[in-house]
Amino acid sequence: MTDHDELLRRVAERALRESGGALPHATAEQIEQAEAALGFALPPLLSRLYQEVGNGGFGPDYRLLPLAGTDGRTAVSAYLAEHAPGRWPTGVLPILDWGCAMYAAVDCTDARAPVLLFEPNAVEDDWSAAWFEDADSLADWLQAWLSETGWYEEEVMLSEDFAGPQPWLPARQRLG
């Protein structure tokens, strides 16, 4: 058993319960095609999530985008549309659209696979101010969803000690 087997089992259980049925999974070939289109590899946990839990359609609030293989919007198409020097860093894959131009995105260049929040609505010219660290790792982000302790949970937002996601310090350098 790997470090993530139990986490993936719990995520799959909740995804099945909330979706009301089995979700289609991404194939190994779809993962390879997505990585080729993106120009970088997915972190192992993210790859397993798409292959073992579902090709999107589960997760917090608006649910994960499909990785690829559908006729609609995907994580790959969102990355290709958003990625731009000075605005969206290379290797940061949007996995969930929060609405209002906001995304949850995984930094695929970092072995920890931190989850970032892109919140551009108050930004005028310095795009580094739109980037926040949501979770230290994808595993932590999934745990927060499972335990209902993510910043997006109403009870969490309304608590007295709510600090919200903090600025992503490497943003300025990564957008360079």
Image (tube, helix red, strand yellow):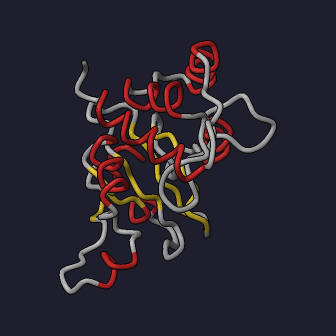
| Image quadrant containing the N terminus | top left
Name, please, the residue furthest toward the left: 161
Left or right, residue 174 beside residue 36: left
Q: Position of residue 150 (x, y in %)?
A: 34, 63
Q: Using the image as rendered, state which of residue 28 and residue 163 is in the foreground.
A: 28
Query: Which residue is painted at 39% across and 39% down in the image?
Result: 107
Query: Which residue is painted at 30% across and 33% down in the image?
Result: 110
Q: Using the image as rendered, state which of residue 146 and residue 172 is in the foreground.
A: 146
Q: How many marks?
A: 0
Query: Which residue is painted at 52% across and 56% down in the image?
Result: 103
**Where 131 falls versus 12 (above or below)?**
below
Left or right, residue 171 beside residue 37: left
| Image quadrant containing the C terminus | top left
Q: Position of residue 168 (x, y in %)?
A: 30, 56
Q: Using the image as rendered, state which of residue 50 and residue 116 is in the foreground.
A: 50
Q: Position of residue 38 (x, y in %)?
A: 58, 27
**Where 48 falls versus 65 (above or below)?**
above
